[in-house]
Amino acid sequence: MAGNREFVYRRLHSLLGVIPIGIFLLQHLVVNHFATGGPESFNRAADFMGNLPFRIVLETVIIYLPILFHAIYGLYIAFTAKNNATKFGYFRNWMFMLQRVSGVITLIFITWHVWETRVAAAFGSHVNFNMMNEILSSPFMFVFYLVGVISTIFHFANGLWSFLVSWGITVSPRSQMISTYFTIGVFIVLSIVGVRTLLAFV
C-alpha cells in the first residue's frame, strides 16, 4: 500500500511540474519579457494579467496549491535521494543531483519573489516596471534573481526530460537522447528570454 502511494505521489509530483506549473512558468516568462519593449509595454501586460476575472481563485487552484505540493514532496525527494554523481560521474547522475539542488534553490527564489511581489501587492504595492527596477537595482538582488531564474528554468527543462521518461513517452534510448537535446534547447532558449528580461528591468 505504501509503495502504491509513493508511486502515485511521484507521478503527481512529476505531472504538476509540467502541468500546470511548467505552463505557468512559460506564461510568466513571456509576460515579463514584455519589459524588453519598455516600461509601458511591461505595465500593460502586467495589468492585463493582474485584472483577469477570478484571479485569486485561479492563482490559488492553478498555481499556489500545485506549487505547494510540488515543493513539499520535492523537498522530501531531494533530502532522501541517494546521489552518486561523484562516484559514478555519468551525465544523467549529474542531472539527477542538479535537479535536487536546483529544486531547493528554486523554492527559495520563488518564495522570496512571491513575497516581494504578490504579498507586497496584497498590502497595496503596485506590481509594475518600477517595482522590478527598484528590486533589481541592487547588484546583490540582480545576481540573486539571475541565479534564481536560471535555476528555475533548469529545474523545469530537466524535469521535463524526467516527465517524458516517467510517463512512458520516451522509452527507447534513442527517444531519450532526442529528448535530452530538446530539453537542453528549451533550457537555452528560456534562459535567454529570462536573462534578457532581467537586463531590461535595469
Image: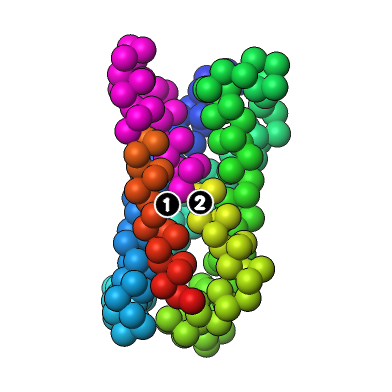
x, y percent for residue 82:
69, 22
Q: Is residue 154 left or right of residue 43?
A: right
The image's mark for residue 76 is: none
x, y percent for residue 171:
34, 15
Reply above or below: 180 against 47. above
Range of residues picked out in magenta: 153-182
Whether the residues at callouts 2 and 1 have beta carbons within 8 Å, the answer is: yes
Q: Let me know if residue 92 appears in the view.
A: yes
Q: Let me know if residue 72 appears in the view.
A: no
Q: Residue at x 39, y 22 (%)?
A: 165
Q: Nearer the viewer, residue 129 or 73?
A: 129
> Which residue type carries mark 2?
Ile
x, y percent for residue 189:
35, 48
* Residue that numbered label 2 is attached to: 150
Q: Residue at x 47, y 85 (%)?
A: 130
Residue 169: image quadrant is top left
Secondary structure under badge 1?
Answer: helix
Secondary structure under badge 2?
Answer: helix
Which residue lies most toward the bottom here? Answer: 124
- Rendered-image quadrant of the N terminus: top right
Q: Is residue 129 left or right of residue 92?
A: left
Q: Residues within 10 Å of mark 1 (few under 14, many from 20)?
A: many
Among numbered discs 2 and 1, the one appearing first in the sequence: 2
Reply above or below: 127 against 145. below
Residue 166: image quadrant is top left
Q: Is residue 48 left or right of residue 161?
A: left
The image's mark for residue 191 is: 1
Colouring style: rainbow
Residues at marks 2 and 1, CA–CA distance in whole angstroms: 6 Å
Reply above or below: 195 against 184. below
> Which residue type carries mark 1?
Ser
Reply above or below: 63 against 112. above
